[in-house]
Image (cartoon, helix red, strand yellow):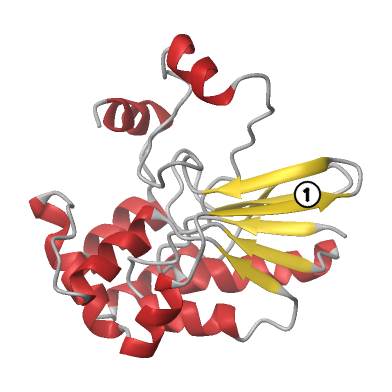
Amino acid sequence: MPVAALYDIHGNLPALEAVLEDVARAGADRVVVGGDVVPGPMPRETLVRLLELELPFQFIVGNGELAVLAEMNGRDSGVPARYRDSIRWNAAQLHPSEGELLAAWPTTLHLNMRGIGKVLFCHATPQNPNDVFTRLTPDDKFNRMIGGLRVVNAGSVGMPFGDPGAYWLLLGPDIEFHRTEYDLEMAATRIRQTHYPEAQEFAANHVLHPPSEEKMLAIFNAM
């Protein structure tokens, strides 16, 4: 029962479309969407595409959904000021019924998988989708939280860093890291044609020229 784990799509529909083709070729028979379907440049289109999957699928919630839901419900999203226009725009794109759908997503998912055993899926940590852990996280904090369990990062479909592409994970019976190449120029053009407030920046900095690992580590560890 191979399971494709797709995390951090962030409304990047062209990346998702390419990944789903690879997921089919890889023989996955289930998809776990690990949060942060939104926010991004094509939030509703991306959500609708996932809901149309022919494979069985399950969602867990990410910090992105929590921020958009807060905005939809008239609460403070808690994001830094520079991202608030993006969150407001994403909230306005979703129907109330879609907000109810996001609100029902759990924070964790447990699967017992052939060749691997018990797997816990979460966004960041089981306790908090907003937690940040990187390879620079101090060992004492990491070990206290994780213990002797194996931790696997599925990568990001829609907002990678390092080399361009869409990153995802195939689980069962082994653990396989996948990078899907797609037409970046075409994707950037489609994104620029949206009314997303950060469309130009997203196309440039998350599709065509993703930030380096070092830059993102510095940002994450300052959070």
Q: Residue at x 20, y 66 (%)?
A: 86
Q: Residue at x 21, y 66 (%)?
A: 87
Indicate the secondary structure of the residue bearing disc 1: strand
Q: Which residue is mark 1?
A: 171
Q: Residue at x 46, y 10 (%)?
A: 140
Q: In this view, which residue lies farthest toward the left?
A: 81
Amino acid found under the numbered disc labelled 1: Leu
Front residue of this view, candidates 218 and 96: 96
Residue 211 spot, x, y in % from top left = 36, 40
In this view, 219 is above or below 8: above
In which quarter of the view is residue 199 placed? bottom left
Residue 128 spot, x, y in % from top left = 40, 43
Residue 165 spot, x, y in % from top left = 54, 53
Residue 132 spot, x, y in % from top left = 38, 34
The answer to whether one can see residue 18 in this image is yes
- In the rendered view of the protein, which quadrant contains the C terminus? top left
Crowd around label 1: few <14 · some 14–19 · many ≥20 (10 Å)? many
In this view, 150 is above or below 9: above
- In the image: residue 146, left or right of residue 172: left
In this view, 110 is above or below 103: above
- In the image: residue 186, left or right of residue 22: left
The answer to whether one can see residue 175 in this image is no
In which quarter of the view is residue 141 placed? top left
